[in-house]
């Protein structure tokens, strides 16, 4: 159970961890001070992918927030409907 909670908690960071690993591999391969065009283009590519994933993450968070609000509204309605049914049955 603890492992699944940890995985759930860390899941938003997985893309960033993967990108960090790719950056580390890139630096080890090309060297930090090399400055070649391939490393520059690879870094730009990684940055654009990170930006895309970050934007998708924000979109999903907004969707999640809307769903949570909708769920709370429905729970409120259910609670009041149950209360109304119990009052009607008691009469």
Image (tube, helix red, strand yellow):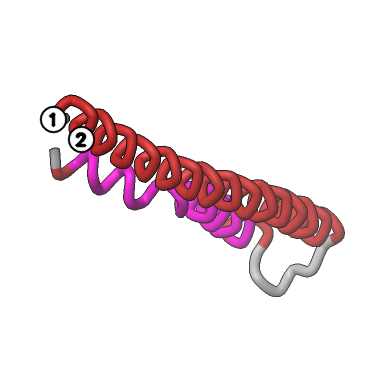
* Residue 70: % across, % down: 50, 43
Q: Which residue shows up at 39% across the image and 39% down it? A: 77
Quarter of the N terminus within the rendering: top left
Q: Which residue shows up at 82% across the image and 62% down it? A: 36
What crowding class fits label 1: few (fewer than 14 Cα within 10 Å), some (14-19), or many (20 or more)? few
Q: Is residue 3 above or below residue 30?
A: above
* Residue 67: % across, % down: 51, 42
Q: Which residue shows up at 40% across the image and 46% down it? A: 72
Q: Is residue 53 above or below residue 39?
A: above
In this view, which residue lies farthest toward the bottom? Answer: 33
Magenta-colored segment: predominant secondary structure:
helix
In this view, which residue lies farthest toward the top? Answer: 89
Left or right placement of residue 56 versus residue 68 in this view:
right
Magenta residues, start to end: 3-27
Quarter of the C terminus within the rendering: top left
Left or right placement of residue 39 versus residue 20 in this view:
right
Q: Is residue 81 above or below residue 45?
A: above
The stretch drawn in magenta includes residue 23: yes
Decide which of 21, 11 is in the foreground and name it.
11
Q: Which residue shows up at 68% across the image and 59% down it? A: 30
* Residue 11: % across, % down: 41, 46
Decide which of 75, 33 is in the foreground and name it.
75
Q: Which secondary structure lies at badge 2?
A: helix
Where is mark 2, residue-wise?
87
How many marks can you see? 2
On residue 16, the disc is: none
Residue 23 visible to the viewer:
yes
- Do the CB atoms of the residues marked 1 and 2 lie less than 8 Å apart? yes
What crowding class fits label 2: few (fewer than 14 Cα within 10 Å), some (14-19), or many (20 or more)? few
Where is mark 1, residue-wise?
90
Residue 18 visible to the viewer:
no
């Amino acid at each position: 159970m603890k492992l699944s909670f940890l995985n759930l908690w860390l899941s938003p960071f997985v893309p960033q961890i993967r990108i960090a690993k790719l950056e580390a591999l890139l630096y080890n391969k090309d060297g930090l001070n090399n400055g070649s065009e391939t490393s520059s283009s690879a870094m730009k590519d990684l940055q654009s992918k990170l930006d895309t994933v970050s934007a998708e993450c924000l979109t999903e968070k907004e969707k999640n927030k809307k769903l949570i609000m909708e769920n709370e509204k429905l729970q409120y309605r259910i609670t009041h409907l149950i209360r109304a049914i119990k009052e009607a049955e008691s009469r």
